[in-house]
Image (cartoon, helix red, strand yellow):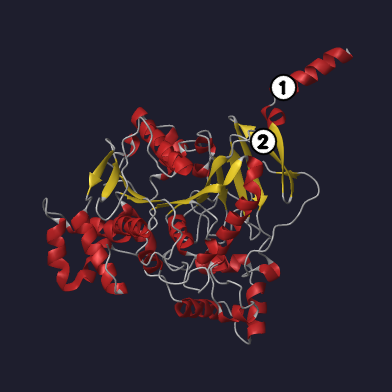
Amino acid sequence: MRRFVLALFVAIVAASPVLAARIAIRIDHGVLNGETEDDVQVFRGIPFAAPPTGDLRWRAPQPAPIWTTARDATDFGPICPQIPREYTKSLSQSEDCLSLNVWTPNTTSPAKLPVMVWIYGGAFVNGGSAMQFYDGTDLAKRGVVVVSFNYRLGELGFFAHPALASERTADEATGNFGLLDQIAALKWVQKNIAAFGGDTSNVTIFGESAGGMSVNDLIASPIARGLFAKAISQSGLGLNEVPSLQKAQQASTDWGTAMGVTGSDAEALAKLRALKVDDILKHRATETTEGNIAPFIDGKVVTGQVSVLFAKGDIAKVPYIAGSNSNEASLAKAIGSDPVKDLSKFGDALPKVRAIYEANGKLTDEEFGRQAFGDSLFTAAAQTLASFVDKAGAPARVYQFAYVADHFRGKAPGVNHGGEIPFVFGFRGLGFLGHFASDADRKVATEMGDYWTNFAKAGDPNAPGLPEWPAFSTASQNTLVIDDTTKAVADFRKGQVGVMTARWGQRVGMTAP
């Protein structure tokens, strides 16, 4: 009987994917218990900084705690406080949110693997690393270690109330707390990723929208130097004006006044830290757009206009990919923009601009505005920043993602903002697309995942079997257009991009290459 019970117990354990798949790793802070899923080892909810609560609210991230017993790392940590959206409403959230996740195919081989660190988008007010379409499994299965993390959002992440200056040391960065969280996560990677099989000298940062902007900010930030070796900015803008410290301070002061924060610095700090998160979010819900929170020039993390720092070569000189999608104007309403009304900004030059856009045929006002919106914020930005990176001496590449998944054909004039993300990560966890994905969709997803991981491995996305992706330079302006047929296109939207870079140059007093 005892032999039968023992055999039954062994059989049950062997059949249990949870019990059979547990794996432990020791890092600087203690032992983590993760699990293996689909031949990839996954560790979730790992603290990379102390909880930014109480007196640490609106302070730079502090060191993560130490734990003395093995810590369960099978569940995502809560996302940072935000107004729930479609893809985050089912996720728990907390001000104690500074955690990260690791997917690795290998923790035993002496060969170190490239590391890809993902920075999510969401207008700096939404998002989180637990969102279903950021699953790193499919990328990890290509032979890279994938890391994702949370960073503070909204007023909790980007806040420049003058009272904060009274408590910081002279060398302490403050205000851009979300970016400081990103830097803290990258420092954690440098200290700990070797335990997961990762190569600390071969880290690629990649992100989309606000995450892509963050990539550009980190490239330009002097305090992020040496924390990564390559960078990919997906729909990361780049020619946008970065708010000044004075503007950020005024906005934060006005916000504080609306929340009842007045008095001396000490009184204001006490009132700020006594605010309930729910009340902070209720006030955020009164905002009509998502475009009023952003990194600003603080003098330490962001030292100037990011586009100008790129132009001057005052950046980390690392291999760089930048690109955008074919219908970025899908973002317009969310940021309070009207692409047709925005055409008035061209003033007297509008007829000349329209003539450039209509070189191949007449356009409706809606189509003209749609294209101009995408070019001004995204297409021109990707090409211009790439040219600055090339000028600084690092290889750069540019893409335009125009492949519309079969299920969505005829429902939009192109690929919406963020539409490339499932093709980078694969369709795992994406029932709304994965269930309907065609063979053609999966072929494009395979290409995108291969390009991104090839770049992470060697700084060059090319490999046998993939359409060639040439470098982008002032002399050879090649853009990889990913569509039904993926191919490099020379001088992609040259006239339209020229209009937008000229407008940028007028604003900053510089000329793009």
Residue under label 2 = 35
Residue under label 1 = 14
Between 389 and 2, which is closer to the camera in this rendering? 389
- At 61% from the left edge and 66% from the top edge, which residue is drawn? 277
- Residue 233 in view in this figure: yes
Instruction: Name the spot of residue 42 as percent of width and height, x first.
Output: 62, 39
State left or right for residue 434 relative to residue 98.
left
**Crowdedness near tag 2: few (<14), some (14–19) or many (≥20) residues, C-alpha within 10 Å:** many
Above or below 61: residue 112: above
Instruction: Name the spot of residue 470 as percent of width and height, x first.
Output: 31, 43
Between 293 and 216, which is closer to the camera in this rendering? 216
Instruction: Name the spot of residue 147 as percent of width and height, x first.
Output: 56, 46
Q: Marks 1 and 2: in contact by CB < 8 Å?
A: no
**Crowdedness near tag 1: few (<14), some (14–19) or many (≥20) residues, C-alpha within 10 Å:** few
The kind of secondary structure element at disc 1 is helix
State left or right for residue 75 relative to residue 509.
right
Above or below 460: residue 6: above
- Going from the N terminus, do you reach mark 2 or mark 1 first? 1
The kind of secondary structure element at disc 2 is strand
Amino acid carrying label 2: it is Glu
- At 83% from the left edge and 18% from the top edge, which residue is drawn? 6
